[in-house]
Each structure stands twice: as C-alpha cells, then as structure tokens.
Image (cartoon, rainbow, N blue to C red):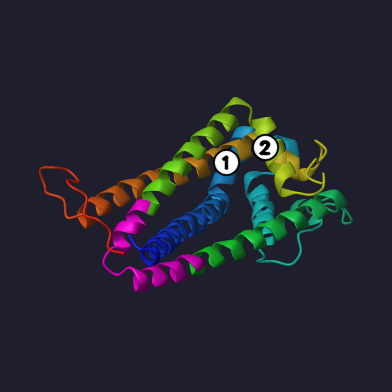
Amino acid sequence: MRAGGRVRAAVTTILAAAVAVSAFIFLVVADIELVAGRLEFYRRSFVRSGALEKTGLDLDRLTWVMRRVLDYSTGRRADLQFDLAELDGGEPGRPAFTRRELDHMRDVRALFEKARVLKWVALGAAAAAASALALLERRAALLRLARAFAGVSVAIILGWVVCAAAALADFSGFWDRFHEVLFTNDLWLLPEDSLLIKMLPESLFRSLALAVLGLFAAQTVVILGAALRVGCRARRSGPAAGCGTEEPLHT
C-alpha cells in the first residue's frame, strides 16, 4: 500500500471510531436523562426507603417536591426553594432546603447542563464524521463503521462490567469517588437531617446507577450484534460459511 493509501486508511479508521464513540456518548447521556427523569422510579423508592416517614410527607406531596427538584436540575424552572407551608398549610417562613443543599443543587444543575451540551455535541460530531467517512470511503464505509462499533462495544461492555462490579461490591465507596470526580467541592456531603438526604438516600442512587448500567449494557450488546451482522453482510459472506473470506477494504 502506498503512503497515500495508508494515510487514507488511517483517516477513515479514525473517522469511523469517532462516529462510534460519539454515538455511544450521546446514548449514555440520553439513558441517564431517561432513567433519572422518571418520577415513578422515585415514587417506588420513597415507599421502599421509608422516605415518607423520614420526611413526614405523603407520597403525593413528596412527588411534588421531587418534580420540583427534577425541573430545577434540568433547567425547566429557575428556582428550587419553597416554603414548607405550601405543602402542609402550617406556619410560613420554613424554607424546605438549607443553603448548603441549594448550593449543591446549583452544581448538579450545572452538571446536567454540561451533559446536555455534550449529548448534542456528540450527536453533531457523529453526523459530521459519518458524512466525511462516506465521502472518503464510499464502498467500504459501512464495513469500517461496523468494525468501529463492534470494537467500541466490546470495550464498553468490559468497562461496564468493571463499573457494575465496583458498584455492587462497595457502592458507598464507588458513589463517593463518583462525586469526587464530578465536583470540585464537598457540598455533596449533606447532613442526615437534610430534606434531600431523607428523600434521596444512597439506596436510591444505587438502584438508579444499576438501572442506567443495565440499560446501556443491553443497548451495547444489541449494537454489537448488529455491527457483527452488518460487518458480515458488508464482506459479502456466503450463507454457509458465516462471515466467510474477508473482502479487503478499498483504499
């Protein structure tokens, strides 16, 4: 292969990998938004974790608070604080959240905003890289994409197995390290009597993390299977010989 051909092959391989990586980044952020945004998930947790007794609020009122937290975190409302009198009709002047809780939730909101930007940037990058790949490698673009998605899928599955094992073995340590990586302060270390801790205990986040891991792992397995199938078809394999003899890529 001439030098020009090697450069072309390297560029198309990088473009295919960029499509796959960007697509998976989009997918994992979308999965987090999907799982973390389901109110029914929190309602079930409130009953299981004893949050109703700890907060002194019934399920509907606690769901109202959770909807407010989610709306604030995802940018659908500007303010989080409210007076508990809005819920129980008691004396006014009782803010629901402490200053530390509000400061931490401001960080959470910023994190959600960055994740949302990352999701759409990843989608744009995947589309741009796929377009460039199609222009450079018309005949073998599909095969290169199949190989890239298969390789990235395997790497993700292995990484997800490690993450799931760490979460199952010691979720408290896993969750602490997760916060230390994402946040530059210790505002996430809230006192046990704070409303957020009473509502959202560690057990809830354990279930949420495993739900995201499980959903993304299942999607990755499906994508891996599809990539292998498409790769076989792209190589024009015989039906009885599996993928058969590999057709060389045209460079």
Measure the alpha-carbon separation of dots 2 and 1.
Answer: 9 Å
Question: Residue extending furthest front?
Answer: 2
Q: Do residues under tags 2 and 1 come within 8 Å of each other at their CB atoms?
A: yes
Residue at the top extreme, as displayed: 169
Residue 177 location, x and y as percent? Answer: 70, 38
Quarter of the picture holding the N terminus: bottom left
Determine if the magenta segment contains residue 107. Answer: no
The residue under label 2 is 175
Q: Is residue 17 left or right of residue 53?
A: left
Main secondary structure found in the magenta portion: helix
Q: Is residue 170 left or right of residue 216?
A: right
Over which residues does the magenta segment extend? 125-147
Where is residue 74? Give x, y as percent: 64, 61
Depicted 210 relative to depicted 83: above or below: above
Q: Amino acid at mark 2?
A: Trp
Q: Is residue 248 left or right of residue 197?
A: left
Q: Visible in this render: residue 1? A: yes
What is the number of the mark on residue 152? Answer: none
- Taking 244 as reference, is 1 left or right? right
Closer to us: 35 or 22: 22
The secondary structure type at the circle numbered 1 is helix
Q: Residue at x 71, y 45 (%)?
A: 181
Asked if residue 129 lies in the magenta stretch, the reply is: yes
10 Å neighbourhood of mark 2: few (<14), some, or many (≥20)?
some
- Pick whichever, 145 or 1, lies toward us: 1
Q: Name the residue carrying label 1.
A: 209
Label 2 sits on a secondary structure element that is helix
Residue 165 placement: quadrant: top right
